[in-house]
Amino acid sequence: MSQTGFQDRVAIVTGAARGMGEAVSRRLVAEGAKVCLVDRDPEALYRVADSLGERTHAIVADVTAPEQIEAFVAGTVERWGRIDMLHNNAGVTGRSGPALDSTLDDLDFVFAVNFRAAFVAIKAAAMHMTEGASIVNMSSLFGIRAAPGMGLYGASKAAVIGLTKTLAVELAPRGIRVNSVAPGAIETDLLRSSNAALHVPGGPSYDEKLKSMPMGRAGTPEEAANLIVWLLGPESTFVSGAVYQIDGARGA
Ligand SMILES: NC(=O)c1ccc[n+]([C@@H]2O[C@H](COP(=O)([O-])OP(=O)(O)OC[C@H]3O[C@@H](n4cnc5c(N)ncnc54)[C@H](O)[C@@H]3O)[C@@H](O)[C@H]2O)c1
């Protein structure tokens, strides 16, 4: 369904080269927005940008580097003069296994990508945002429930929810909304690789795991994008500080 009010609004989407970030970017461009696409993978990023055309601006950046985040925020303002939407989507699962087997380097890495990057990006972008702007931070069902085998990932996604709620309150007087989405299984490279990492010999296969879920399948990146774009856009103006699960009833 097409939404109104995206024409010439400016968005930044991190992790835009594939998966949900790509789906959100495609949808935003289709709605008439201009999108700064950010990813650390240049080849995949330029492929997405080329297919979307001149309403996109691709910036290769690693979100673990705060100065690279500041550079893509500045680059967006330089190119289009404003920032209306920020989707902090780039994420990694980190090393799988029991949480207490993780090293401090494992912890720092997963928090740097999944949590610190969102904080730095909001800090840099919020000063350019005005009334009506919207921020959506990517959490996970594992940020709400236990995540055995992916404990630090879950903890980083729980931290995203905490940041979302506080900033929603603190930025509300400026008319800036901040929300979070918490997907269950969404059919992307990340889901496939994390399932492979957690697979135990003789355990259920990827397909068997999906079949055992309430809807018998994973969600599609486009289904997730429907929710995220609604939260980013002008039809959700009284929604802020929320955490939306999108999981086909898996977390029910
Ligand atoms: N797929 C799922 O089932 C699922 C469930 C819950 C939450 N999530 C979250 O959704 C978000 C998107 O996941 P996806 O499944 O679309 O993953 P994906 O692996 O398909 O895409 C993630 C993108 O982020 C980019 N990225 C990773 N680290 C980066 C970095 N340091 N700097 C810049 N770019 C970086 C990757 O290059 C990739 O293009 C992630 O935050 C993930 O944790 C995914």
Image (cartoon, rainbow, N blue to C red):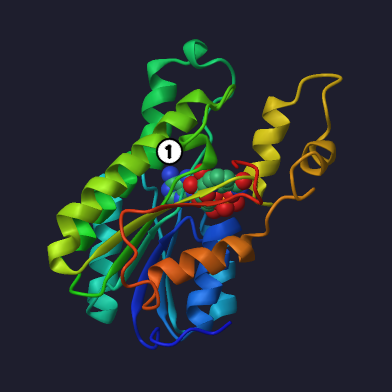
Residue 138 in sight from this viewpoint: yes
The percent position of residue 176, horizontal first and vertical second, equals 22, 66
State the residue position of label 1.
157
* Residue found 52% across the figure and 65% down from its top: 227
Q: Which of the pair 102/217 is nearer the observer?
A: 217
Q: Secondary structure under badge 1?
A: helix
User: Which corner quadrant holds the C terminus?
Assistant: top right
Residue 102 percent location from the top left of the image: 48, 16
Q: Against 174, is 188 above or below?
A: above
**Residue beneath the point at 40% across and 34% down:** 156
Identify which residue is drawn at 31% across, 69% down: 238
Image quadrant where one finds the N terminus: bottom right
Residue at 51% x, 39% y is 92
Q: Is mark 1 within 8 Å of ligand 1?
A: yes
Q: In this view, does 114 lie above or below 103?
A: below
Vertical placement of residue 146 versus 39, above or below: above
Residue 19 placement (x, y as % from top left): 60, 57
**Nearer to us in this view, 45 or 124:** 124
Q: Position of residue 89 (x, y in %)?
A: 45, 53
Identity of the residue furthest to the front in this view: 252
Count of marks overlaid on the render: 1
- Residue 54 sits above or below residue 90 on the image: below
Residue 65 in sight in this render? no
Label 1 amino acid? Lys
- Seen from the viewer's position, the closer of residues 111 and 141 is 141
At label 1, counting other C-alpha atoms closer than 10 Å, the crowd grade (few under 14, some 14-19, many 20 or more) is many
